[in-house]
Amino acid sequence: MSQSVYVAGVGVISAIGNNVTEHLAAFERGEAGMAEITLLNTIHRHKLPVAEVKLTDEELIAVTGPTTHNSRTALLSLVAAREALNDAAIPNLKELRTGFVSANSVGGMDKSEDFFVEFLADNSKGKLKNVFDHECGSMTEIVADQLGITDFMTTISTACSSSANAIFYAARLIKNNMLDVAVAGGVDALTKFTLNGFNTLMILDKEFCKPFDEHREGLNLGEGAGYVVLVSDKVAKTLTNPAYCKLSGYNNSNDAYHQTASSPEGTGSYMAMKGALAKSGLQPADISYINLHGTGTQNNDSAEGTAVKRLFDPNYPPVSSTKSFTGHTLGASGGIEAVFSVLSIKHGLIYPNLRFKTRISDLPFEPETKYLKGQDIKHVMSNSFGFGGNCTSLIFSAV
Amino acid sequence: MATNKYLSSTCTIAKNAVNKNGITLFKNPGTDITAFLLSVYQHFHFNYPKFYKMDNLGKLGWLTAEILLKDDFERFNYEPEEIGVVLTNSNSSLDNDLKYFDTISDIPSPSVFVYTLPNIVIGEICIRNNFKGEHAFFIQEKFDAAFIAQQVNYLLDNDILQACICGWADVLGQDYKATLFLVEKKKNEQALLFSPENIDSIFNTI
């Protein structure tokens, strides 16, 4: 039986705030989260800006309580997932079938990196405990334990579209009557591995990133976590606070073009957006706002821009990339931006695309640069496109 | 439902020779791996400029798949989603990882970096052939015929795939070997049964 899936709660942590309220305030102030590196121990300090969550691991533990493996990834995940679950305040949660579908791409790697410094110097040194929870799935298990979720859990790792895929997988579990409630989204902490890797690919901007600008020079890495609580029709009716919106459309497509680049025509992104519209039964003209993937790299923005043009020309909805605030949070970005999309509907918001100056020469549209509130937002499209050509679009709709 | 599956074709590249369906098609003794793989590419008149960008694992797997599928695969019988790839090896992408590590002291090379994962070779084969079915790469100590048969049987018996390219592709320094099998549900004239015994024996022949 196909049924609607509702968003009952949201939770988010990123460089611009430790919870939903702080994010809304940062957007209104137009305050970006990038800065010089202060927490990550790397040779790129003072050279590359990143968007760090402004709490140390110890400060995060003070918020969450200690877990079995205090990887920064697990701690960030726990903060946002718990906020989402509390926000949803689902009556009789214990009697419902609840799942945790969480995405990430680095797992407990931050701790493994510490381990290897000691271990490489002396093979008898290094705490094995620090590599025990290296893998992505461990993060999900640790957080599910802390949340008391035991009915179902799974981890999705498909690079930068990971948590968008987690959300739509969770929605399908509810639609197919396998779960009543799912906490879905994702997390990624900054690590040396990802910073060095993206630096090798020569796609990091040494200044603050400029998504969708003709003179964009790359992305800034960020970290954080974002989760939505999805519920079935039946659970939605029991909520004390009304549901935020519905998840009305979703699609995952792959352009099978290159390991780390989209095809110039944006075939994968085009198919994902088109497929999500078809799933929701909407027309391009129905979309009130697009939260772009908008990483700020030459390749993504031109491919995504071309795909938006193919689908929406000549009537473009307002579009912007909130990565101009949060940096690119990789496996967390789909979850974080899903939360922003939900809040866009709830508060009638369109987020500004910071630092935009010059329209991309091949594109007939440009991103919104002003913070707009009180807008009539009915349907928001959220794009998340990953390495390997893994492209996902979600559509959230007002109820 | 479990039905018989057949080895429509097999191809091995090892020891400076290319062998397809038991017949040696090309030999170039005495050359190092890079020169040998290039000579295979040239001998078969392949025209795929991206070949030159690939790491040795990518080149080895790609060439083996090209020769495996050449003349013997009626791809139009299948949808892209019905064809998958299951590969194994014992050295992951270590050959290229070491080369990448050497570039770090100077300027880390983006083009070497993108090959620092073993499953990239599957990507190269899928991009070339527009295969969009399930795929997986397993790292194991040695060629494990029973394991591969179990994986591929599962995919075909449950109609997740209708055809599968499977086998082994491994490179480390000058040591290399690839053996790929094209597994289909329909039986061609001389096709052998797809079984752990048959693929093990073909793998160990060369």
Image (cartoon, rainbow, N blue to C red):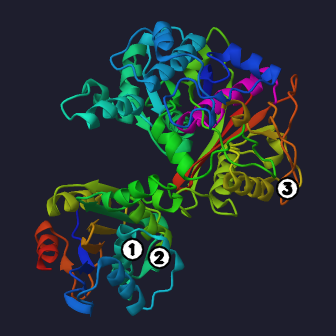
Q: Residue A313: which numbered mark, if any?
A: 3
Residue B51 badge: 2
Determine whether, in the image, residue A15 is placed left or right of residue B205. right
- Magenta part of the chain: A327-350
User: In the image, what residue occupies the spot 52% across and 32% down?
Assistant: A190
Q: At 57% across and 54% down in the image, what residue appears? A: A253
Label 2 marks a residue whose chain is: B
Q: Give residue A13's position: percent from left, percent from top.
A: 60, 21
* Secondary structure beneath label 3: loop
Mark 1 Cα shell of 10 Å, populated few (<14), some (14-19), many (≥20) = many
Q: Quadrant of residue B116?
A: bottom left
Give the residue number, with chain letter if any, for mark 1. Answer: B59
Kindly report which numbered mark, 2 or 3, lies closer to the viewer in this rendering: 2
Asked whether disc 2 touches disc 1, contact meaning CB atoms under 8 Å apart, the reply is yes
Asked if the residue under mark 3 is in contact with the one under mark 2, i.e. CB atoms within 8 Å, the reply is no
User: In the image, are marks 2 and 3 on the same chain?
Assistant: no
Marks 2 and 3, how far apart in space?
37 Å
The residues tagged by marks 2 and 1 sit, at their Cα atoms, a distance apart of 6 Å
Graded by Cα atoms within 10 Å as few (under 14), some (14 to 19) or many (20 or more), the crowding at tag 3 reads some
Q: Does B26 sit above or below residue B107?
A: below
Q: Are marks 1 and 3 on the same chain?
A: no
Q: What residue is shown at x 69% (from left), y 36% (from top)?
A: A323
Quadrant in the picture for the C terminus of chain A: top right
SS at badge 2: helix
